[in-house]
């Protein structure tokens, strides 16, 4: 076994032992296949290559102090992948196949699940692609579903620390009636240039505004946005953002902590009234926001003067992590023991 320094892991790719695959042909999904290859043989006219028929998911497995491995919200990810498949005309994968493949991928790579004290986790990446040939713009007839895993540390290298994010009005990630609500590769392609510009200027992510009026908050790079004020957890309702499973968890935890929860359009100016703000997602967990710079308007909204996360962000973060690592009881049924 390679010597992995678990505490120093970043959010990067590391080869693991096996991946799990299922093929959709003649209207049927195949039995699962286990592969030790990192490659996929591909037809040059496959629809995933030309027309972006590609959807992926991201979920994590955690090893607790008790040595047990917990997969977090696997069913929700299966359902979201079905929604993405419908959204871009791909064959839907049954939830049971998704769950079996994910569980198998974790078990076969058990030696890569980081120990609990490292704070790292096993990132699980399910992928669904159109594989049959088409030159006309049409959905494929055949699909491949693959699950690979890789051990990861924090997505934002700062971990649970505040970072600044920037608004860049000349870039949109998704259109109001486009594919923003699906987890499909095209949305990420659309975000790459703005993301690189933001990183070069010292921001951890781009805060996107709604594409139509540039009036409301949409989401934050690869994460949803939330704000806290007057004992209320507020997160954007929008037709162009990915429905984050982490955000759903935080809404539940916030409610049970006695906060009100509002999911509604958030006008940009409302940022000046927020006491705390953060980004949330599987990779991002909770990443508290230090400030938002509206770069083109030369205006800043500051949430943390001393650079420390706010108290509500901190509490939500610890409660979420405690459930994921098995330190708190799984009262919501979010965890599947592997
Ligand atoms: N928004 C985008 C664009 C994402 O890529 C992600 C990551 O999956 C999220 C939000 C957060 O979603 P989740 O909490 O389900 O991981
Ligand atoms: C995730 O949080 O799982 C994501 O997919 C975000 C990003 C790495 C694309």
Image: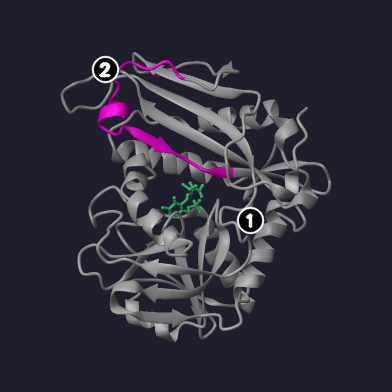
Image quadrant occupied by the N terminus: top right
Q: Write the start and end of the magenta stretch as one range.
A: 40-59
Q: Give the residue at mark 1.
A: 332
Percent position of residue 188, x then y: 37, 46
Visible in this render: residue 302? Answer: yes
Q: Is residue 283 left or right of residue 200?
A: right
Indicate which disc residue 63 carries.
none
Mark 1 surroundings within 10 Å by alpha-carbon count, few (fewer than 14), some (14 through 19), many (20 or more): few
Mark 2, mark 1: which one is toward the viewer?
2
Q: Residue furthest right?
A: 66
Q: Residue furthest left?
A: 136
Which residue is rendered at x = 71% and y = 34% of the image?
112
Tell me whether the residue at label 2 lies in contact with that at label 1, contact meaning CB atoms closer than 8 angstroms.
no
Q: Secondary structure at mark 2?
A: loop
Percent position of residue 248, x then y: 51, 59
Q: Give the residue at mark 2.
A: 133
Which residue is rendered at x = 25% and y = 32% of the image?
51
Image quadrant occupied by the C terminus: top right
Q: Is residue 228 left or right of residue 136?
A: right
Q: Nearer the viewer, residue 78 or 293?
A: 293
Count of numbered tags: 2
């Amino acid at each position: 076994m390679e010597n992995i320094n678990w505490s120093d892991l970043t959010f990067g790719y590391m080869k693991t032992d096996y991946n799990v695959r299922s093929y959709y042909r003649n209207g049927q999904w195949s039995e699962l296949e286990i592969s030790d290859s990192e490659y996929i043989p591909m037809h040059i006219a496959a629809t995933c290559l030309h027309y972006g028929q590609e959807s992926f998911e991201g979920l994590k497995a955690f090893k607790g102090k008790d040595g047990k491995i917990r997969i977090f919200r696997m069913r929700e990810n299966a359902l979201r992948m079905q929604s993405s498949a419908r959204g871009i005309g791909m064959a839907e994968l049954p939830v049971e196949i998704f769950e079996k493949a994910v569980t198998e991928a974790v078990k076969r790579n058990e030696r890569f699940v980081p120990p609990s004290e490292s704070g790292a986790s096993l990132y699980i990446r399910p992928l669904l692609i159109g594989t049959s040939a088409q030159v006309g713009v049409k959905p494929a007839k055949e699909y491949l579903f693959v699950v690979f895993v890789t051990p990861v540390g924090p997505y934002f290298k700062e971990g649970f620390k505040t970072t600044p994010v920037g608004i860049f009005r000349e870039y949109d990630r998704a259109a109001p009636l486009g594919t923003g609500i699906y987890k499909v590769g095209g949305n990420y392609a659309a975000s790459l240039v703005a993301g690189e510009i933001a990183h070069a200027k010292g921001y951890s992510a781009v805060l996107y505004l709604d594409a139509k009026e540039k009036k409301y908050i949409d989401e934050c790079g690869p994460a949803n946005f939330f704000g806290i004020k007057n004992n209320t957890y507020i997160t954007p309702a929008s037709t162009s953002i990915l429905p984050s499973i982490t955000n759903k968890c935080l809404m539940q935890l916030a409610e049970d902590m006695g906060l009100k929860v509002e999911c509604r359009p958030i006008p940009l100016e409302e940022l000046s009234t927020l006491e705390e703000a953060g980004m949330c997602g599987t990779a991002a967990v909770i990443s508290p926001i230090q400030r938002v710079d509206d770069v083109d308007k030369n205006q800043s909204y500051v949430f943390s003067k001393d650079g420390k996360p706010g108290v509500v962000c901190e509490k939500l973060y610890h409660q979420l992590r405690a459930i994921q690592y098995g330190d708190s009881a799984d009262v919501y049924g979010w965890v599947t023991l592997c």
